[in-house]
Image (spheres, rainbow, N blue to C red):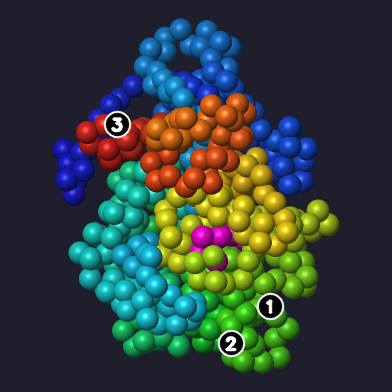
Amino acid sequence: MKKNNIPVNHEDRALKGIRGEMLTFKADPFLCPETECYDHYADGLVVVSDGRILDAGEYAEVAPRYPELKDIDVYTDSVIMPGFIDCHLHYVQAPMIGSYGDTLLRWLNQYTFPMESRFFDKDFADEVAREFMKQLLAQGTTTANVFSTTFAESVDAIFEESERYNTRMITGKVLQDRNLPDSLRDSSAEESVALSEELLKKWHGRGRQLYAVVPRFAPTSTDLQLKLAGELYQRYKDSGVYMHTHLDEVQSEIDWVKQLFPGVPNYTEVYNRFGLVDRLSVFAHCCIVSEEEWELLHKADCGVVHCPSSNLFLGDGQFKYWQAKDRRRPTLVGMGTDVGGGTNFSIFRQLGEAYKVAMLQDHSLDMAHSLYLATLGGAQTLHLDHQIGRLAPGYEADLTVVDLHPSEFAQWRMKFSPKLMDKLFVLATLGLNNMVKATYVAGQKVYDRSREQKWQYAR
């Protein structure tokens, strides 16, 4: 059986093994000694049953416990890691990725808003969702916190395609009722939030899909829409519904917020006054953040997202991880590609960009800290670290297999870097586009670079 010309994987096995060198994080290296934060197995084995990890560790220790395990995928010259977690990107901007820009606000008006205006067309939304999901899986991403746009069709399209792969997508109808073209602007604050609630009831908790209340950013919502959005979020937050928006990306945006909300002390407080700063709130960018704002974000236990490729491409502010991870009031931090401001779909390649952003500010970000942000750190940012982000018993079996020799040059270069973290840093710095051999979602191999049909829907 096929859907949209992609075959469905009908393999049905009681136990599945995935063997090779393994790396998985268990604590935050920004707050704990680095050597205590991850487990590395030179020859590891992950045992999967019914979509979850049954066991994980050194092959010599784990394999004897499962004499009935015969189905094992073996990977050499590779590293098996948890599936990458993209905490912020726009699937509706995939068709305009790489478009020339000079400032954020002009870039939005010239490229972004016209493109997003096309998503009232369900066929177009379906086409973009299919390509978007393929690109994520080819880069090892298994969970993503995604912006859709104004139209219900855009929400349905990405959730439907995610459901076919059994990935976890977090998204929702974008709320935006001012300062946009008529073709994209909500006609009514009340109707827009009512539609968002309808979509929430339809999709939240359906399989692995999760819903978010999504005001685009404060300047594109009226006070009434922000108020109603906050009320919607507060009604459903205890059931795991998120709030996702942008915050403190660039100085011109911050200045605009001051004009639109006079008397409010800072950008974060604008959201807070409308009930939008809470435990399951996720704020993208956070490049120019005052100490008062960091205190508020920490107290609320919400997450922020570092989007280095986008910040470099659009010349925005630059994220300061040392501020976010200040031990006096640490904030949860994940990585985001921010497609289409970001220039690729790879969380792994973002790590090389994050290093550059830090270096521009006289700081450094090593591979252990970066990979934590891409896996367990992302799961903690989304408060899903009890389900994803680790290779450990009980966790959902989302995995990615990173190729240590993705090109002839990379294979040669690795001869001069004997340590694993050094090898991974080289790969992130080179930024090759074919670094992932395979991607598993709930134990099923939905992407295999060497397979004739690279992508396969889940059962």
Q: Amino acid at mark 1?
A: Glu
Q: Is residue 103 above or below residue 152?
A: below
Q: Residue at x 18, y 49 (%)?
A: 4
Q: Give the class, few, some or many, for how many residues have Cα within 10 Å of label 2's Cα (few <14, many ≥20).
A: few
Image quadrant where residue 146 sits: bottom left
**Could you say whether the residue bearing mark 1 is in a helix, strand or loop?**
helix
* Percent coordinates x, y for residue 100 in the rendering: 39, 73
Q: Is residue 199 visible?
A: no
Q: Where, quadrant-wise, is the C terminus in this rendering?
A: top left
Q: For the point 59% across and 22% down, which residue is it?
A: 41
Q: Residue type at mark 3: give it.
A: Ser
**Residue pictured at 31% horizontal, 84% vertical:** 183
Rendering coords of residue 253 (x, y %): 58, 81
Q: Nearer the viewer, mark 2 or mark 1?
A: 2
According to the picture, the residue beneath numbered tag 3 turns out to be 450
Q: CA distance from mark 2 to mark 3?
A: 49 Å
| Quarter where residue 184 is shown | bottom left
Report if the CB atoms under discs 2 and 3 are less than 8 Å apart. no
Mark on residue 256? 2
In the rendered view, does 251 fall on the left or right side of 344?
right
Q: Earlier in the sequence, mark 2 or mark 1?
A: 2
* Residue with the mark numbered 1: 269
The verdict on residue 128 being magenta is: no
Q: Residues within 10 Å of mark 3 (few under 14, many from 20)?
A: few
Lower position in the chain sequence, tag 2 or tag 3: 2
Which of the numbered marks, if any, corresponds to residue 59? Answer: none
Q: Is residue 282 left or right of residue 129?
A: right
Q: Which residues are magenta?
A: 303-311
Q: Is residue 304 magenta?
A: yes
x and y percentages locating residue 381 in the rendered image: 61, 53
Instruction: Tell which tag, 2 or 3, sits nearer the viewer.
Output: 3
1 vs 3, front mark: 3
